[in-house]
Image (cartoon, rainbow, N blue to C red):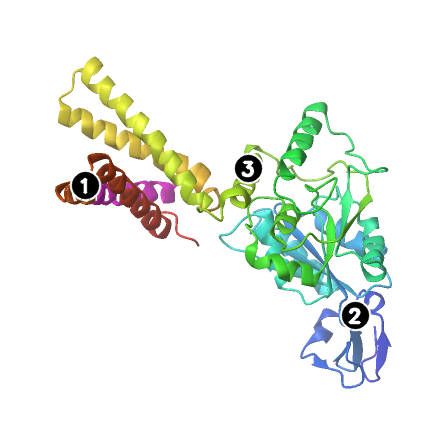
Amino acid sequence: MIRTNRELSTPRAALFGACDAQALDNPVRSGHHPRLFRVKGILLDAPDLTVVVPTFNERENVPLLIERLSNVLAGIAWEAIFVDDDSPDGTAAAVREASRRDPRVRCLQRIGRRGLSTACIEGILASSSPYVAVIDADLQHDEALLPRMFQTLREEPYDIVVGSRYVSGGGVGEWDASRQRASAFATRLSRLITKAEIADPMSGFFMLKRPVFEGAVRKLSAQGFKILLDILASSETPPRLKELPYDFRVRQFGESKLDMMVAWEFAMLLADKLIGHIVPVRFALFALIGGFGVFIHMGVLWTALQVIGLSFLAAQTTATITAMTVNFFLNNVFTYADRRLKGWRALRGLVSFYVICSLGAAANIGIAAYLFNQQEVWWVAGIAGIVVGSVWNYAVSSIFTWKSR
């Protein structure tokens, strides 16, 4: 036990492992040193480094990562913020349990939100350290590189230090040929939007100075899993960066989060940085799916009339409902992947989408008819109606069908 009836000045890394979490009530800034906090007679260093760890179903890896961070960051005033997207396996509970033994560890649990990039952003914003690192919880990144990253940022003229798989000395571990090809292709694509020379812009393991993040944060797309790429593409001037090699490890516990949606979100990030300043990517995708719905509508209408032999009213009704249903599910999977509705919520969302699109169709027809009656060219009136209907459907469905939770 640490005595609390006398003042101690102890490096945070050495103190917290032995300090009872309950001794941290009512901290007050020490008047003796601008970087120290007085906590019931104990003086603690404010953290110089925050390690942000986004998590989803990583309960088994949490204690292992904390132990490794404690070992490699000895002598550095650090903290770790685990940002958990409400993992069903109890990851947040595991982090809180660890934080009672080691107050350097903090848990930021998010309800109703998901995504690695947004988790990293919120974790960084929740910190005050001048240096911030991002590392995955799956133990595939080499945490032993963190002290060297920290030293590089403090002593050399760099803004970001990246753990790189693609510089001399680095490697991708046991990846098969198909994954290596996919990664190489994604790396080439990412160079369309990056403003810095970098061999591994897809890396999820890096450390940066806080001003770099603060300069880019309001322009971040927050799409998908590639927060480093987002920061590089959103910075006004190319950050000065250095890449340090490391070997990508094999996951020990849990399951990989890589799937087709990761690739889709990566494509959305690229699109946002390329055309997002012209038109919102989510609206562009919504309109594209709407255009696809026109082909669905016409196909069903022809089939119902020519093959099944329904009346025009019945055929048109069937085609309209089919097209709206297809549009809803495509938008639910792609356009609003981050707000995807499931179960009964999806059914309620479908009903609201029917209502919204019906009103949008009425707006489409009304605007087009009005403009045509004002002696406008027919195709101008038609396009105006389509635009008004599309904007209505997008705006209202974003608020009511796929509202943010």
Q: Quadrant of residue 187?
A: top right
Q: Quadrant of the image for the C terminus?
A: bottom left
Q: Earlier in the sequence, mark 3 or mark 1?
A: 3
State whether residue 84 appears in this view.
Answer: no
Q: Nearer the viewer, residue 237 or 352?
A: 237
Q: Which residue is mark 1?
A: 376
Q: Mark 3, mark 1: which one is toward the viewer?
A: 1
Q: Quadrant of residue 372?
A: top left
Distance, label 1 to label 2, CA atoms, is: 77 Å
Q: Which residues are magenta?
A: 342-365
Q: Mark 2, mark 3: which one is toward the viewer?
A: 3
Name the spot of residue 178 as percent of width and height, x first: 68, 24
Q: Which residue is mark 2?
A: 19
- Dominant secondary structure of the residues highlighted in magenta in the image: helix
Q: Quadrant of residue 184?
A: top right
Q: Which residue is mark 3?
A: 267
